[in-house]
Image (cartoon, coloured by chain):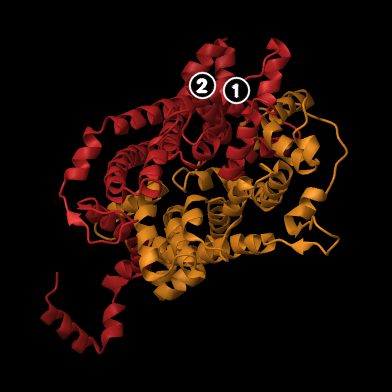
Chain colours: A red, B orange
Amino acid sequence: MASSAVVAHEIRSEGGFLPWLLAPQRRGPLLVAPALIVLFLMNIFPLLWSFGLSFYNYSAKKRDVPDFVGLRFFERVITDPTVWERFKTTAIIVSSSVLAQLVIGFLLALLFSKQFPLRRILLMLVLTPMMLSLVAVGVFFKLFYEPTFGLVSQAVAMFTGDRYALLGSPTGAIIGVVIADAWMWSPFVMLLVLAGLVSVPKYLYEAAEIDRASTWRRFQTITFPYIKSLLLLAVLFRTIETFKLFDVVYILTEGGPGTATETIGVYVYRLAFQYFRTSQSAALAYIILFVVIVLTSLYLYAVNRRAQEVD
Amino acid sequence: MTRSREIGRAGWGWTAFAGIIALIYFFPVMWIIMTAFKTRPDALAVPPKFFFTPTLDNFVGVFFRAVISGGGAAQATEFPLYFFNSIFIAGVSCLLALIIGTIAAYGFSRYPLKGNETYMFIILTTRMMPAIVVVIPIFLMFREIGLSGTYAGIIFLYTAFNLPFTIWMVRSFFDELNTEIEDAARMDGATERQLFFGICLPQVKAGLAATFVFGLILTWNEFLFALLLTGVDTRTVPVAMARTLGGEMGVDYGLLAAIVTLFLIPIFFVTFLLQNQLLRGVTFGTVRK
């Protein structure tokens, strides 16, 4: 770090602030500075602010001066059984949804790993769910599950003669949320697996054919090694994204029945904007941030491993 | 994404098989689109109607509110404004993110800082973070400085929202370039500015276009920030969609379906054109092949 005297000297000797700023050794920092400033203002600063908030007893509804409470909210969040309940709900939804996405995405990728007429157009049909607005998915799946008019209920009624309210029971509601989320994002997994399948050299399959290797053996020894790292990437990426699950759940079930589908995202929203326990929600947000940081580093680790494999 | 020489070929038989699966998968979307062409009784018919007389009333309804009492002229709805807002806010913020992000990506790629990858990691983390984590302080901050409900506020926020994605994407394009050309140009006495504008930028042009469009798609459907930070005049379509739910006559599914359909069309065509870049796009440029 240059002291201010040295800096001042540099400015004088090179004739002004601008040449000093544009010197070759400052090119990197200068290029990334605007982006870092914007990110700081809109992401890091708000985070620091909320970090500060979590030490005070603050509510967005009240206008009086908040008092300092130290780590009380962190303590409350960590020892709060509801928080762990919500984490458990989130974990159940995330793991079942990501598993479903893996299976469906993998099967779809097998389907599209061949070259056939109209492939591009059919692929587009499968990709469309990803482009839908989350609000639209929430509202229309709610309609599909609706007991009187809903397609699911009416299809069930054809066999049993009874109407069926999927979202009425806790397990049913979780299944309903998982179906909507998995339907929307399986195409994402498909894209990743497809990239893996395409990268398998064809001569390996030809050799396997000569050796009369069984389909399972071919999958185990040839296909799987090529898609392994991409599957890992898909799992991590989807876990991070599903962890945030908010919009669809909020519209589909509002976290219900009871709190059966209240994910951690919905819970933070409720704390902040319905109960106005701003400080407590900020403390909880920090715990979520920690989870996301861990998951993101795992993801980047997987990305690097994959990059090495490809090279 | 797919190089046909490396994958197996199949004929029309496979097309028929894949077609059936694709149509089943597409069915919920199909149903939404069909609902957009149904009358109100048809939309909620028991048993559900697969065949019906299509009507364009819902699409008209998106733009004009029927005046029930008396035969007065139909009143225009605010939806044109919401569509404009969605396009304007997404367009401007993605363009800003593209400019700032490309410059930064060039820096990260060609002039690595001390701890370069740590910066990249932090940048990615800000994007992976649930919106709910930052939205609380941003909501308070915007309320404090009067940015709530303004174009400037939401555009600035979306610019930051798109930056991580843009930086990771564009950097992946810069990293792939062959640096020998740059080295040769540098030997010939090209200035740094000429290197950037004359050599690097033209080579990643297609990538920049793809990045811009993916940014648009991400911003297009964003709901939570828009819900909390836009006002009556700056409301975007997803928020307006959610607001149609609270009518006293129950949800007007036909109208909502018409909005969803109209809102899907631009994205659908853009994605179709970008199919080859899709994988890189959906993984923020972290997975290339």
SS for dot 1 = loop
Amino acid carrying mark 1 in the image: Ala
* Front residue of this view, candidates A117 and B40: B40
Q: Is residue B85 visible?
A: yes
User: Contact, CB < 8 Å: mark 2 with mark 1?
Assistant: yes
Are the residues under badges 2 and 1 in a single subunit? yes
Left/right placement of residue B16 relative to residue A228 reads right
* Front residue of this view, candidates B98 and A216: B98
For residue A18, which quarter of the picture? bottom left
Q: Is residue B190 visible?
A: no
Disc 1 sits on a residue from what chain? A
Q: Residue at x 43, y 53 (%)?
A: B168
Residue that label 2 marks: A169
Left/right placement of residue B77 relative to residue A232 reads right
Left/right placement of residue A38 relative to residue A128 reads left
Instruction: Look at the picture and state if A29 lies above or below B34.
Output: below
Instruction: Look at the picture and state if A34 lies above or below B275.
Output: below
Disc 2 sits on a residue from what chain? A
